[in-house]
Amino acid sequence: GDTPTRGGLLHRVDIEQVVDHLFELHLDLSTAAAVALRETLFASHPLRRLLTPFLHQTITVNDRAHDLLVAERSMVSRTLAFTGEGLQLAWDAAPSLVCAAAMQPGGAAAELSGASPFERLMHIVDRERYLEARRAGGVDTPYERQAGRLYRVFKAYVEASLRAVYPTAASLAADAEMTGFAEGLLRSLSTTAPLVAQPGAGSAGGTHEVVAVRGLPPPQLAELCTCLIATVCDRVTAGHEQAGHLAVYAKDVRFCAWRWPVGEARGNKQSAITQAILTSFTFMPMPKLLAAPGSEDDWSQLFGGVAGEEGLRASYADFQRELRALADDFDAYNAAAPTRPFPDGWGLWTNHPALLEVSVNL
């Protein structure tokens, strides 16, 4: 229930791993982005080069996630507290749970009830609007303020990169590959598909109006593409660190067992072993987001020989400088933790650029 018990923590961990981690980040968002990238963008397209680091090894990772974690009688079904029927119910509910979370941050659904389809769509793809709705609903934590700062760095990087390629919103709208990518991704995501016109559905479908992506005015289309790309970058890095970092949950079954025997108050040796095995299966480290120039994590070579090369290289260099400055600020915040009163007297590392990987791992 809502009582903050160890049983409640168990329920939270299990649901978070199935819905927020495996379904939303792996099976839904990152898979859809990787597929849209390959189906709509030629290898030399600047957007494909920009997104390549953030979708590095994603298809391989998610294929392994299916075999090791999602398939029937895999490690998730053996390790978490769900019965077979309960796990299937969780998978069945995942799309609606993800949509509800996207559309109702801090009670924002009431504010969106009269919004246009485009405004509702932007509320989902623009993480800054999402966090603003959370603040309006009374949720304003140091974590979310740091998350907002990191998202703005991603958004500024995407804006600068798109300006290097498209001098005007009209030139972006005229690029069939760019609009095809945005349309294909939005049609695939559980959170946005109900708001976007599907093939053969015209400009409306079901019982409510939807957005025809290719029919948007160029300024709206440019804004949509910018926020969509920035949100993909944010979710596969900081979003995955928040929902997908399993090791901290698996260390001690006396505190956070993912299942325990009936009548017991904590996990047993079998629980500890299965949690350790599952965690070992998920160790597939990716390159770091924050990269020193010329290091093995530096992706600037991707922009060679493409349209807007000089501007893309410059925007990537600026992006890395902004990440470094943000990391320094977060280090200072963590160092000052002992001087802050409760409940803010601890550090935060979930959005720390120096600790984030550039793409999803297991």
Image (tube, rainbow, N blue to C red):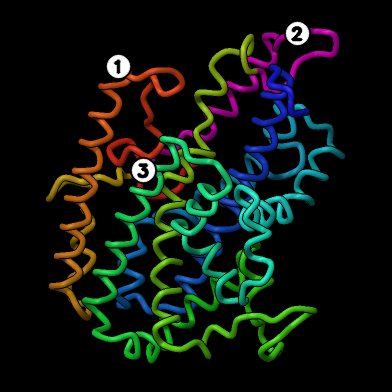
The earlier-in-sequence mark between 3 and 1 is 1
Which quarter of the picture shows residue 166? bottom left
The residue segment tinted magenta is 257-286
Q: Which residue corresponds to mark 2?
A: 265
Nearer the N terminus, badge 3 or badge 2? Answer: 2
Find disc 1 in the rendering and name its residue: 339
The residue tagged 3 is: 357
**Residue at position x 59%, y 24% in the image:** 277
Disc nearer the start of the sequence (1/2):
2
Q: Could you classify mark 2 by the number of other residues whose Cα lies within 10 Å: few (under 14), some (14-19), or many (20 or more)?
A: few
Q: Distance between the residues labelled 1 and 2?
A: 36 Å
Expressed as whole percent of the image width and height from the top left, the position of residue 256 reads: 63, 18
Q: Which mark is residue 22?
A: none
Image spot of residue 2 (x, y percent): 74, 28
Q: Position of residue 293 (x, y in %)?
A: 13, 50
Indicate yes or no whether the magenta region holds residue 259: yes
Give the amino acid type for the residue marked by disc 1 in the picture: Thr
Eyeballing the image, is 348 above or below 38?
A: above
Q: Crowding near pointer 3: few (<14 within 10 Å), some, many (20+)?
A: many
Q: Give above or below for 316 relative to 200.
A: above
Left or right of 3 on screen, residue 226: left
